[in-house]
Image (tube, helix red, strand yellow):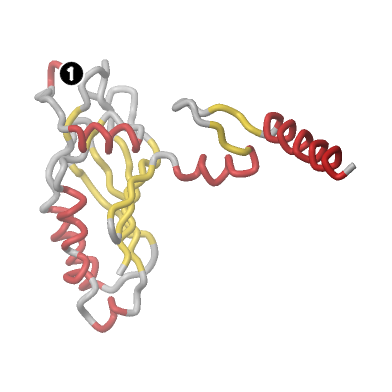
Amino acid sequence: MFKTTVFKKLSVLAISCLVWTFPLGNGSAVAQQNSEAIENSFNVVQFHKLSLQKLIAVSRQDDFSKPEELELSPLSQVEENIARDLNSHWAWPEHTLEMIDSYSPFLFRTKKSQDLSEVKILLDVNAKGRVSGFEVVGNVDKGTKERLDHMIRKLPNCKPVPGYSIYSPERFELTINK
C-alpha cells in the first residue's frame, strides 16, 4: 500500500511537471510560474555594480543608417554576447562595462551623492552608434549630473552588429549601484 501511494504521488508530480513546463529557445524547460521573472530578465546585461538594459528603439522613419554607411568590423565574443543579451543591433565595446564600473567611486564621492544607492540613466544611441544624449531618472544633485556627463562623454561608440539591413537609434537604461 505504501509503494502504491508513493507511486501515485510521483506519477501526479511527473504529469504536473509535464503540464506546467514549456520549452525555451535553448532547449531547456522552465515552469510557467517562473516565466514572468525570466521574461523580465531578458535584454539585461549585469556587470559588477551596474546593469544595462535595452528599452526601446527611438527612431523616426527616416532616422536610420544602412550597413554601407557604417564601418562594419568583426565583433569579439564578448561584444556578440552583449548584443545578443540586449537584443540589439548595436554592440557595446568589450571594455565599456568595466570602464563604467570603474567610475562608480568618482560618481558617489560627495556627501550628497553618497545618500544615493543607485543612479539610473537613459542613454540614447543614434543611427551612427554614438551616444547622442542622456537623461537621469530621479533626482540627483548638480555635481553628480556633471560627473555623469563627464563619464558619458568618455564612452566609446557602439559597433554595428553585422547582418542587419538597417541600424536605427536605440535607448538603453544604465543602472549604476553604489
Q: Type of residue at label 1?
A: Pro
> Between residues 89 and 28, which one lies in front from this camera angle?
28
Asked which secondary structure carries label 1, the reply is helix
> Between residues 146 and 102, which one lies in front from this camera angle?
102
| Position of residue 90 in the picture relative to residue 171 (left or right) | left
Q: Is residue 109 above or below residue 154?
A: below
| Total number of numbered discs in the rendering | 1
Give the image quarter of residue 36.
Answer: top right
Residue 17 in picture, x, y percent from top left = 68, 35
Give the image quarter of residue 118.
Answer: bottom left
Q: Residue furthest right?
A: 1
Give the image quarter of residue 30.
Answer: top right
Identified at 32% across, 70% down, the residue is 140
- Residue under circle 1? 67
Q: Is residue 55 above or below residue 48?
A: above
> Between residues 156 and 135, which one lies in front from this camera angle?
156
| Position of residue 136 in the picture relative to residue 15 (left or right) | left
Residue 25 in picture, x, y percent from top left = 47, 25
Identified at 20% across, 18% down, the residue is 66
> Between residues 169 and 160, which one lies in front from this camera angle?
160
Residue 23 in picture, x, y percent from top left = 55, 27
